[in-house]
């Protein structure tokens, strides 16, 4: 067994979904951050558990062919990117392997794996950023959390965000510091301004600035609204979101429009959509369109078929399929997102879509009792996957096809396994990279009801 604080020479043979390299020392798996497959390292053991250990690379003795120089000054401190030290080709291979491993090893499933869909651009692709605030040397700063902590790492510019976000961010920070506005502290649950939250329409260019606060400070922000609206012509909306709770959840339920519109507009899969602060909207628009195109390919709805879209958000997936199907029935738990979905359907002249608010399992169960019999179910659950109730209700509905979109291949494989035990074959899986340079990867899964 490796000993803590000792340094061993080892070769990295794999990467985890968290972006850590894996080597074996004295027969034990050791996880080493910021290493690449093929690196030969001097690994210092920092923690030893019963069946595995954690280490850090004290020295790269022989670098991997996949290794590149990272181009971010805070890469090793920030918890955002995990894979800036390897080539993008290596990153895609790694993520494709993570998807395959989840289904074959975790799920015990062996579907056909379609070609992995990598991103066309690995920089400046995000349409949303949420920056926590902190106080350093008496001044407000913001950035991103260090790994596995809520310690803010100040960031002047992030290569994943549009450049204009950095300019807007600095303007807001300067205002907070000049006006000496109070910054929230998680440790003491005191202070007022918690986050600066920015959204941008990838196609429209429209920008929303959202200031997350513990209480209403509209009067203190009025001059900031004038400053931002005069300085940045792309800003269409300035919102104050109120979150008074002692929680690590970023947004509260109450939004107050301080200037401009309540929403911003964008285009997704040819449909015009409105995006509110609370709406779910994929952060990489270009890749999301490719993801939804793959989902539509798998669903292949006929003109007489009904699609149920569970966890539908602002309706973007279902609406992208509406022209090919007879009817879309969407279910989403966030009321504002449901209203956005209804407005998006109306705005695009889509009359064959309806949206319902509530828990996916409960609402869809009620709709089924009222006679809703979908031919195809599209499900896009959160990272924790589908609830057991939702899996049961989906299988009881017995659609011909299930198309699952997931941001967590492990829970997707788990849910696909459960559905396979309820009469469905897992036919195809396709990995899609919506989050280049990070450890996240999405997948689309096609399941078909077995005739027996």
Image (tube, rainbow, N blue to C red):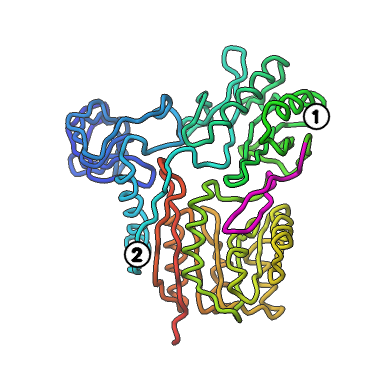
Of the 4 image quadrants, the one containing the C terminus is bottom left
On residue 218, the disc is: 1
Describe residue 334's horizontal placement relative to residue 384 as left or right.
right
Residue in the foreground of this view, choosing between 246 and 258: 258
Range shown magenta: 260-277
CB within 8 Å, label 2 to label 1: no
- Secondary structure of the residue carrying tag 2 is strand
Question: Seen from this angle, which residue lies furthest right?
Answer: 219
Of the 4 image quadrants, the one containing the N terminus is top left
SS assignment for the magenta stretch, majority: strand
Residue in the foreground of this view, choosing between 242 and 130: 130
**What residue is drawn where x is 78% and y is 23%?**
223
Describe residue 277's horizontal placement relative to residue 386 as left or right.
right
Residue 176 on the magenta segment? no
Can residue 261 be seen in this snapshot?
Answer: yes
Describe residue 31's horizontal placement relative to residue 119 as left or right.
left
Give how far across and how far down residue 436 sits, in percent. 42, 44
- State the residue position of label 2: 113
């Amino acid at each position: 067994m490796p000993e803590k604080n000792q340094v061993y020479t080892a070769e990295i043979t794999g990467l985890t979904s968290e972006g850590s390299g894996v080597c074996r020392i004295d027969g034990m798996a050791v996880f080493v951050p910021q290493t690449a497959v093929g690196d030969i390292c001097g690994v210092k053991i920092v923690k030893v558990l019963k069946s595995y250990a954690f280490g850090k690379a004290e020295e790269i003795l022989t670098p991997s062919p996949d290794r590149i120089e990272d181009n971010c000054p805070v890469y090793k401190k920030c918890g955002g990117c995990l894979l800036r030290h390897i080539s993008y080709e290596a990153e895609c291979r790694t993520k494709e392997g993570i998807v395959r491993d989840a289904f074959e090893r975790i799920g015990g499933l062996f579907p056909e794996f379609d070609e992995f869909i990598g991103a066309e651009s690995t920089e400046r692709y995000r349409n949303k950023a949420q920056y926590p605030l902190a106080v350093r040397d008496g001044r407000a700063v913001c950035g991103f959390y260090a790994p596995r902590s809520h310690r803010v790492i100040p960031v002047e510019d992030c290569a994943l965000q549009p450049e204009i976000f950095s300019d807007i961010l600095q303007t807001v920070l300067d205002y907070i510091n000049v006006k000496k506005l109070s910054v929230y502290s998680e440790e003491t649950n005191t202070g007022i301004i918690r986050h600066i939250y920015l959204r941008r329409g990838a196609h429209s260019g429209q920008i929303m600035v959202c200031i997350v606060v513990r209480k209403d400070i509209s009067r203190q922000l009025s001059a900031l609204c004038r400053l931002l609206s005069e300085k940045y012509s792309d800003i269409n909306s300035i919102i104050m979101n109120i979150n008074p709770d002692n929680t690590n959840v970023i947004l509260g339920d109450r939004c107050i429009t301080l200037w401009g519109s309540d929403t911003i507009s964008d285009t997704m899969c040819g449909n015009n959509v409105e995006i509110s602060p609370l709406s779910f909207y994929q952060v990489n628009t270009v890749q999301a369109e490719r993801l939804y195109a793959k989902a539509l390919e798998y669903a292949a709805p006929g003109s007489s078929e009904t699609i149920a879209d569970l966890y539908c958000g602002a309706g973007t997936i279902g609406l992208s399929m509406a022209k090919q199907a007879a009817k879309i029935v969407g279910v989403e738990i966030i009321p504002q997102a449901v209203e956005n979905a209804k407005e998006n359907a109306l705005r695009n002249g889509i009359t064959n879509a309806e949206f319902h608010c509530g828990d996916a399992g409960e609402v869809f169960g009620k709709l089924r009792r009222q006679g809703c019999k979908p031919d195809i179910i599209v499900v896009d659950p959160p990272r924790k996957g589908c609830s057991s109730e939702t899996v049961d209700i989906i299988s009881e509905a017995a659609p011909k096809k299930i198309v699952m979109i997931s941001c967590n291949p492990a829970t997707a494989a788990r849910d696909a396994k459960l559905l396979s035990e309820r009469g469905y074959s897992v036919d195809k899986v396709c990995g899609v990279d919506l989050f280049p340079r990070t450890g996240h990867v999405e997948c689309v899964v096609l399941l078909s009801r077995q005739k027996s």
